[in-house]
Amino acid sequence: MKKVLIVLFLSFMFITNVKAEDLGLTESAKSSILIEASTGEIIHESNANERYAPASMTKIMSLILIMEELEKGNLSLDEKVKVSATAASMGGSQIYLEAGEEMTVNDLLKAICVGSANDAVVTLAERISGTEEAFVFKMNEKVKSMGLKNTNFKNATGLDTANHYSSAYDMASMARELVRHKKILEYSGIYETYLRQNTKNKFWLVNTNKVVYKFYNNRLL
């Protein structure tokens, strides 16, 4: 998989009068974009419409649909969702959910936003649409409704597969759409947390986003 750096300075960072080159952000990137969150103004772009495998950034669109369901009242944070064998079998980043296990939507969101957990996102995809495939159809319908031309999803996780692609511009547009749902910032801003507290399967989640880490450390000073 070709590496792609997509610079998404959205709700976490606001930069004015600065060039991406000055920050050394695009030296090795095959594709990049820097936008202003509130207006969508493009501050910098390079090959922003080239198609690449988006990997776990796919979950940006998955989270958009999840947040929409929460806001419509079709899903609640304290609802417990049962994990299917399919969801439990996901590889890659995961929290090692077991088939038949139940976890709240709140904790599943933590797992997705902090740990990029594939098993967690498929669990919620199945809860919303019945199957991951049906959920992916909704993802692509949302892509079309946003007018994005260089994105096609084949799964909700970002696991590498044929014909699964996006671009820096499309991903930035999706990220900008996601942070319109203010609740998501409560999850994406978590530095560390635990799942399955007070059980033998207690699971530690830690955010590898350096911006979140820096903010967290400064807050403690």
Image (cartoon, rainbow, N blue to C red):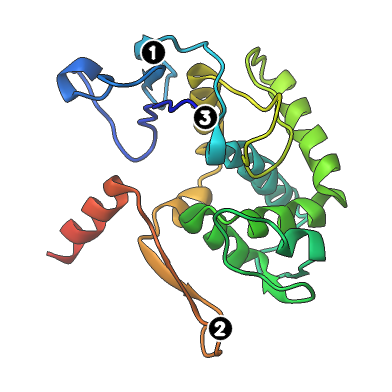
According to the picture, the residue beneath numbered tag 1 turns out to be: 42
Residue at image location 34% in from the left, 48% down from the top: 209
- 3 or 1: tag closer to the N-terminus: 3
Eye-nearest disc, 3 or 1: 3
Q: For the residue labelled by badge 1, is the local secondary structure a helix, a strand or a loop?
A: strand
According to the picture, the residue beneath numbered tag 2 turns out to be: 201
Q: Which residue occupies the foreground of this view, 161 or 11? A: 161
Q: Is residue 146 above or below residue 93?
A: above
Label disc, if present, on residue 34 of the rendered structure: none
The x, y position of residue 118, in whole percent, is: 62, 54
Residue at image location 38% in from the left, 10% down from the top: 46
Label disc, if present, on residue 1 of the rendered structure: 3
The x, y position of residue 95, in whole percent, is: 57, 66
The x, y position of residue 185, in whole percent, is: 45, 49
Q: Residue 93 lies in what quarter of the image?
A: bottom right
Q: For the residue labelled by badge 3, is the local secondary structure a helix, a strand or a loop?
A: loop
Eye-nearest disc, 1 or 2: 2
- Which residue, as the protein is rendered here, is positioned at the far left? 221
The x, y position of residue 66, in whole percent, is: 68, 48
Residue at image location 46% in from the left, 12% down from the top: 48
Q: Residue 155 lies in what quarter of the image?
A: top right
Residue 205 visible in the shown view: yes
Q: CA distance from mark 3 to mark 1?
A: 26 Å
Q: Is residue 158 above or below residue 85?
A: above
- 1 or 2: tag closer to the N-terminus: 1
- 3 or 2: tag closer to the N-terminus: 3
Q: Is residue 102 above or below residue 218?
A: below
Name the amino acid type tagged 1. Ile
Q: Residues within 10 Å of mark 1 (few under 14, many from 20)?
A: few
